[in-house]
Image: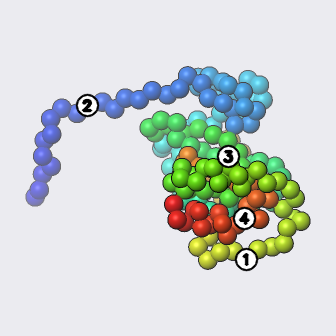
Amino acid sequence: MNELPNTGEVKPVTFELPDSINCAYCEKKIAMSVFYCPECRKPLGIMDIGEFLRRIDKRQIMDVRHGGLVLGRNTPDDDMLMFKFIGPNVLYVSGLMQGMEFIVCPEATASNMGLLEEINQEHGDPDELADTPRPEALNVFNTNLCSPVEGYSEFGGVWVGSQYIINRYATKKHLALLTEINTRR
């Protein structure tokens, strides 16, 4: 039987959380010590890693960190909670997104920020654009398959990293280019 070598003293893991964050719903800066935003009364959405993993297992939260087209309710409302790590083992609701938006993976976001910002400046009614074929390399995340995030939202949520989200109009107009950017990283 092989034994692991004794490496000496176990050092405790320490980290600092910020004192405050911005509410994902109303953007008001709020203390981390409260559970609900005092301005809009929505839940802050802070959870530990155990609770987060239980919710992934229950299919309430979908991992979209690889980037791609996020399917969801086809409304102009931002209604999907985006969960992001704020420190080791702690996540919070960092924002909201809507179905038919494209989320770019962190690596491609970092290396293409200028181009992504330029693409995202285009706005309009996505229904006025002709349908475009889906590129073969396109990742598709169907959040309609998620259960509601109990205690937080009547809809499912997504797990994000440091990523850029492209609005619905620009996504439909530039789907092939966004897919190429996301896959070349």
Q: Amino acid at mark 4?
A: His
Q: Amino acid at mark 1?
A: Pro
Total labels: the figure holds 4
Q: Left or right: 58 with respect to 81?
A: left
Instruction: Name the residue that disc number 2 marks.
Output: 11
Front position among marks 3 and 1:
1
**Residue drawn 15% across the image and 49% down it:** 4
Instruction: Name the residue that disc number 4 marks.
Output: 174
Q: Amino acid at mark 3?
A: Leu
Instruction: Name the residue that disc number 3 marks.
Output: 81
Q: CA distance from mark 1 to mark 4?
A: 11 Å
Q: Residues within 10 Å of mark 2 (few under 14, many from 20)?
A: few
**Residue drawn 48% across the image and 42% down it:** 49
Nearer to the camera, 170 or 27: 170
Mark positioned earlier in the residue sequence (3 or 2): 2
Front position among marks 1 and 4:
4
**Residue 133's disc number:** 1
Q: Residues within 10 Å of mark 4 (few under 14, many from 20)?
A: some
Q: CA distance from mark 3 to mark 2?
A: 35 Å
Q: Position of residue 28 (x, y in %)?
A: 72, 27
Mark positioned earlier in the residue sequence (3 or 1): 3
Circles 1 and 4, Cβ within 8 Å, touching? The answer is no
Q: Amino acid at mark 2?
A: Lys
